[in-house]
Amino acid sequence: MTPQIGTGSRTLDVRRYRSRAEMGRAAAADIAGDLRVRLAAAPAVRVIFASAPSQSEMLNALAAEEDIDWPRVEAFHMDDYIGLDAAAPQRFSVWLENNFFNRIPIGAFQRIEPDPDPIACARDYTELLARAPIDIVCLGIGVNGHLAFNDPPDADFDDPDDVRIVALDAVSRQQQVDDACFDTLSTVPTHAVTLTIPRLLRSDRMVCVVPGRAKRDAARKTLHGPFGPAVPATALRRHPHCTLYLDQESDPDG
């Protein structure tokens, strides 16, 4: 059943941990438990994953979880750059393969392939996502509060599209350098294909993993700041089943 998307008045379920490793293990254990329950009740489960170093601890722990029937899981990702070589290690589909999918017998991984036609890519990925409900979204929050590549102040909480082409905010591009994904800002692509906020929120459960001091201000605004596109992650307050995992450094209330 598709959850009803509200106005942002809900309080997020926040779980706090002493370290990134502890946070990652806890989030992975919760995701694994949810997957086992869903796979016991349905022939297949569909999951959207974020591609970022902030997700590494969770993904490492999830890959080590036992008794998950991965061949019955169909995986998607949230976004990818326009204009990168298909095999570039910075491409998010490649990152997920290298850091997660190559370690588990995933049933299917649906890649966003923006080149050579980003418009066709957005259309085709929209159709793939629409074939059945999305069960779980595993995501993070950017330093500027972005979700996927929905950057402030242009993030649209009521976007009519499910997948779109976007110009990347300078802060989002600099984050890729700070995360050691690119050497210089000039080498970070300026545009990407991304899932929109309404598409992400039309999932049954959201698991949001946000470690590190660089994310503390974004976490504070997500939890306590004004609701709206100035901080796209405040849209998570609309979701009825979203859990936010923080470590000691990212916790604004710690």
Image (cartoon, helix red, strand yellow):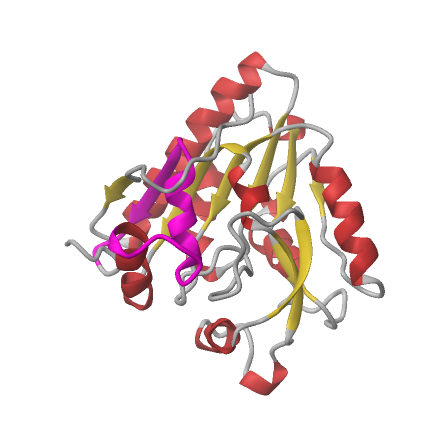
Residue for point 48% across, 78% down: 174
- For residue 160, side relative to residue 178 (left or right): right
Please say whether residue 240 is one of the residues in the magenta stretch.
yes
Question: Image quarter for residue 86?
Answer: bottom right
Please say whether residue 57 is one of the residues in the magenta stretch.
no
Residue 90, relative to residue 236: is it above or below? Answer: below
Residue 47 location, x and y as percent? 58, 36
Question: Image quarter for residue 243?
Answer: top left
Residue 153, relative to residue 100: is it above or below? Answer: below
Residue for point 28% across, 64% down: 217
Residue 55 location, x and y as percent? 45, 53
Number of numbered discs on residues: 0
Residue 119, relative to residue 170: is it above or below? Answer: above
Given residues 201 and 37, the one toward you in this image is 201
Given residues 202 and 208, the one toward you in this image is 202
Question: Image quarter for residue 218?
Answer: bottom left
Residue 67 location, x and y as percent? 51, 24
Residue for point 73% across, 44% down: 126
Query: Image quadrant for the N terminus?
Result: top right
Residue 22 location, x and y as percent? 28, 46
**What is the span of residues highlighted in magenta in the rendered image?**
224-248
| Residue at far top of view | 41
